[in-house]
Amino acid sequence: MKLIVAIVPDHAAGKAERSLVAAGFTSTRLATTGDILEAGNTTLLIGVPGTRVDRVLRLLREWAPGEGEAFVLATQAAEAGVIQAFAGVGAGRPV
């Protein structure tokens, strides 16, 4: 499992998200402020299997060519089942 952290311009964020959903991916959208690539950006967090990373990056490039940044992080915790353990938090099940 990989976590893609994509910083895209605000004007392209909605289109990028719709493109991801149409291709079967989901994301979490965060408003980005500060000096990261200057103002007017949105950060998308996208969890995908390692074999699908290239597809997501191609979709992002379609909607923000040359304007954004994407970082791919390995999520070894997900592969070890740690993330699944958190599914029980707040549901009365011990972690």
Image (tube, rainbow, N blue to C red):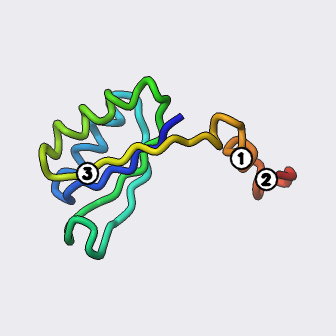
The kind of secondary structure element at disc 1 is: helix
Image disc number at residue 95: none
Q: Alpha carbon of mark 3 to alpha carbon of mark 2: how far?
A: 36 Å
Near mark 2 (Cα within 10 A), the count class, few <14, some 14-19 or many ≥20, is few
Query: Reading the chain from its start, which is encountered first: label 3 or label 1?
Result: 3
Residue found farthest to the bottom: 34
Q: Alpha carbon of mark 3 to alpha carbon of mark 1: how far?
A: 30 Å
**Residue drawn 75% across the image and 45% down it:** 85
**Residue drawn 25% across the image and 34% down it:** 59
Q: Which residue is tagged 1?
A: 87
Q: Which residue is tagged 2?
A: 91
**Residue drawn 41% across the image and 34% down it:** 25
The kind of secondary structure element at disc 3 is: strand
Q: Is residue 67 left or right of residue 27?
A: left
Disc 1 residue type (three-letter):
Ala
Q: Is residue 1 left or right of residue 38?
A: right
Vertical order, 19 against 90 (above or below) = above
- Which of pointers 1 and 2 indicates the residue nearer the eye? 1
The kind of secondary structure element at disc 2 is: loop
Is label 1 in contact with label 2 (beta carbons under 8 Å)? yes
Q: Alpha carbon of mark 1 to alpha carbon of mark 2: how far?
A: 8 Å
Residue 65 image position (x, y, % from top left) = 13, 43
Disc 3 residue type (three-letter):
Glu
Q: Tell me which corner region of the image, top left, top right, bottom left or bottom right, holds residue 58.
A: top left
Residue 36 image position (x, y, % from top left) = 27, 68
Q: Which residue is tagged 3?
A: 69
Residue 13 image position (x, y, % from top left) = 25, 52
Disc 2 residue type (three-letter):
Ala
Residue situated in front as seen by the camera: 81 or 16: 81
